[in-house]
Amino acid sequence: MEKINNLEDVDENSDIIDMWTPLNFDSNENYKFVSDNDLYNLISDVVYYFVAVPVIYIISKVMFGLKIEGKENLEKTNKAAITISNHIHFLDCAMIGLAMFPKRIYYTASDGSFKMPIVRHLVKLLNALPISDNLNSKKRLLLAIDDLLSKGEKVHFYPEASMWPYHKKIRKFKNGAFEVAVRNNVPIIPIVFKFREVTGLRKFIKEKPFITLKILEPVYPNTEVPRREQIENLKEAISKAMKEESRNLYEEI
């Protein structure tokens, strides 16, 4: 695993970490993005609620000092929604899962995550939906997401498209999440990961800052303007709100 250190000339949506992906994975026409196997889904729920959540909670609190704010904003929408966030850590999807607890959420993820030993099982357990470069697979993924939203589920996107560990700024957004929200006429719930100073005894042994997850108020598409304008307005408004929120604590680090 290699990381690019000089980010000045790097495209904001590009990968800066070269992940080890030795396994094969193909989300072809036989791949089911959402399982309809009752036994598998039962096992998934049991493992998620009784194993994954307790472990993730302890790790997030002890190692990363995770603090969750704004959870009341989740109650300001109907059930179906798109959630988005900046992408700053390997486990930030698991942290979002804690914020949504006891509800479960689906995540879009690079299919590279499904090519990594152990990680592929974790992301599958977390209801990850693989994004492929294959056009047919992308179409099938979008149909699966539309179906989930029609059933009142929440689906998470990373509009920055790639992970930049502990990056303090909100990067340029791609259109995908906003197009899906407008097409399905569902709100977007922005989530901002930001950082704060390490306190207590951990400041003597921990180099990285603590993590705060802040859930902002939902933003709805403006259906009174053309679709393309809805998408751009939604993206611009949410990007502005997330940037403003992200500045709140960075100056303290």
Image: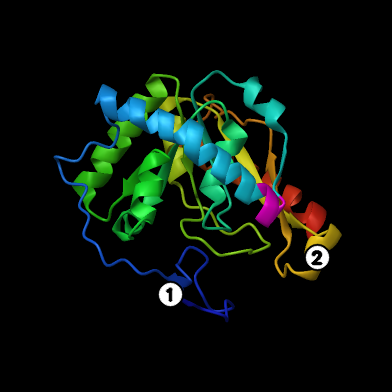
Q: Is residue 7 above or below residue 25?
A: below
Tell me the element at label 1. Answer: loop
Within 10 Å of disc 1 (Cα), the crowding (few <14, some 14-19, many 20+) is: few
Residue drawn at the location 63% of the way across and 42% of the way down = 191
Relative side of 147 to 102, left or right: left
Q: x and y percent of residue 27 in the render?
A: 22, 47
Q: Is residue 102 above or below residue 15?
A: above
Q: State the extent of the magenta-drawn residues as a range.
A: 61-65
Of residue 101 and residue 16, the one placed in the foreground of this image is 101
Within 10 Å of disc 2 (Cα), the crowding (few <14, some 14-19, many 20+) is: few
User: On the rendered image, what quadrant is the C terminus found in?
Assistant: bottom right
Relative side of 155 to 22, left or right: right
Regarding residue 33, the answer to whether it shows in the image is: yes
Q: x and y percent of residue 165 in the render?
A: 58, 64
Please tell me the numbered disc located at residue 124: none
Q: x and y percent of residue 84 in the render?
A: 54, 42
Please tell me the numbered disc located at residue 203: 2
Marks 2 and 1, how far apart in space?
A: 27 Å
Of residue 104 and residue 164, the one placed in the foreground of this image is 104
What colouring does the structure picture have?
Answer: rainbow
Of residue 237 and residue 96, the one placed in the foreground of this image is 96
Q: What residue type is disc 1 on?
A: Met
Q: x and y percent of residue 230 in the render?
A: 52, 35
Residue drawn at the location 35% of the way across and 48% of the way down = 121
User: On the rendered image, what quadrant is the N terminus found in?
Assistant: bottom left
Magenta segment main secondary structure:
helix
Tell me the element at label 2. Answer: helix
Regarding residue 251, the answer to whether it shows in the image is: no
- Residue linked to disc 1: 1
Quadrant for residue 124, please give it: top left
Q: What residue type is disc 2 on?
A: Lys
Relative side of 236 to 140, left or right: right
